Amino acid sequence: VPDAASRRIKALDPDVVNKIAAGEIIVAPVHALKELIENAVDAGSTSLEVLVKDGGLKLLQITDNGHGIEKDDLAILCERFTTSKLKKFEDLNNIATYGFRGEALASISHIAHLTVTTKTKASNCAWRAHYDGGKLSPPKPGQTSDPKPTAGRNGTQITVEDLFYNVPTRRRAFRSASDEYNKIIDMVGRYAIHCQGVAFSCKKHGDAGTSIAVQGATSTVDRIRQIHGVGVANELIDFSASDERWGFKAEGLATNANYHIKKTTLLLFINHRAVESSNIKKAVEQTYSTFLPKNGHPFVYLSLEIDPQRVDVNVHPTKREVNFLNEDEIIQDICENIRDKLAAVDTSRTFMTQT
Ligand code: ADP
Ligand code: MG
């Protein structure tokens, strides 16, 4: 039984609070990377390059050609709740950009060494700044922490080094760098398929080739072909659904009844953010069950746009979970269209083999 003195309630050290909060948002390297990709897309980039070392634990670097960050904003860039995307609480109802509450860079800077090199079009040089614990920090002991002018292209490069260096229990929990790298490839692949007009590359440090290389002008089907193979790309049907009553519009590409895999691949975007939904996945699998052999599953890319006022993105700091109104009706509409399209392909095939 603790004695009276040790039972007293005390405020946690802010540094401890920040590290705990950061660990809730960034569980694995891929979560940091997702935030960085979303920031780059928000900045209007048409090219994103990702470089990874040791599954992202040693190095995670993303270089974009977006609008860059003003030099004068660098001092507060990594403070918690500093953002250019949300100004008042009501804005949460109409948020169009990926990020919205200025927590990502702050979180990363509390559990990794962060370096930002950025240049706006109007600036005649790039600026480089280092961050630790939410604040500008000197690159080497004894040096100044002020941003330094440097050569660089328009856009932003974010370098994250030694992720979880100060959270040893979390750091030790990662057994395999290649597992973490696979998660990263999966996430880059998702955005590379979804973000039309944007070029993507992803490379493991030391490798000669790239794991993903998609040019800006590549069509969505060709993006799927390059990332998931011809087998999938040659058997795609497109589907769509919309209903003003439920404030949604859905579009996607899914494999037909001639194709199946062991596990469902669902690339789901809600308002251009990669999310998970077990309800949507279940409904899609149910829809395919009458068309595919037992244990056969589809590949589905689904982009769902829902009136922001009907979506609650604020359910969890990771924003991986999204709630929206009339979920059942929306899912049903989408699955009905997929079913119609699958049936149409099925009949044309039966018809062809009969004649
Ligand atoms: P949020 O995205 O929620 O605003 P972040 O911590 O992810 O919060 O980013 C903070 C701010 O830094 C953003 O609002 C944006 O102004 C700026 N920023 C971050 N990454 C980039 C980037 N790649 N290009 C331009 N600006 C960026
Ligand atoms: Mg962000």
Image (tube, rainbow, N blue to C red):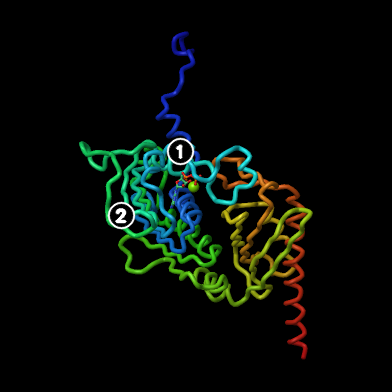
Q: Which residue is farthest left?
A: 142
Q: Secondary structure at mark 1?
A: helix
Is the shortest distance between ligand 1 and the CB of mark 2 under 8 Å?
no
Residue 22: numbered disc: 1
Residue 240 visible in image? yes
Q: Amino acid at mark 1?
A: Ala
Is the shortest distance between ligand 1 and the CB of mark 1 under 8 Å?
no
Q: Position of residue 338 (x, y in %)?
A: 72, 67
Q: Is residue 157 left or right of residue 304?
A: left
Q: Residue at x 44, y 57 (%)?
A: 66
Q: Which residue is farthest bottom?
A: 355
Q: Residue at x 32, y 50 (%)?
A: 127
Q: Which residue is farthest top?
A: 4
Residue 172 visible in image? no
- How packed is label 1: few (under 14 Cα within 10 Å), some, or many (20 or more)? many
Disc 2 to disc 1, C-alpha distance: 32 Å
Q: Which residue is mark 2?
A: 125
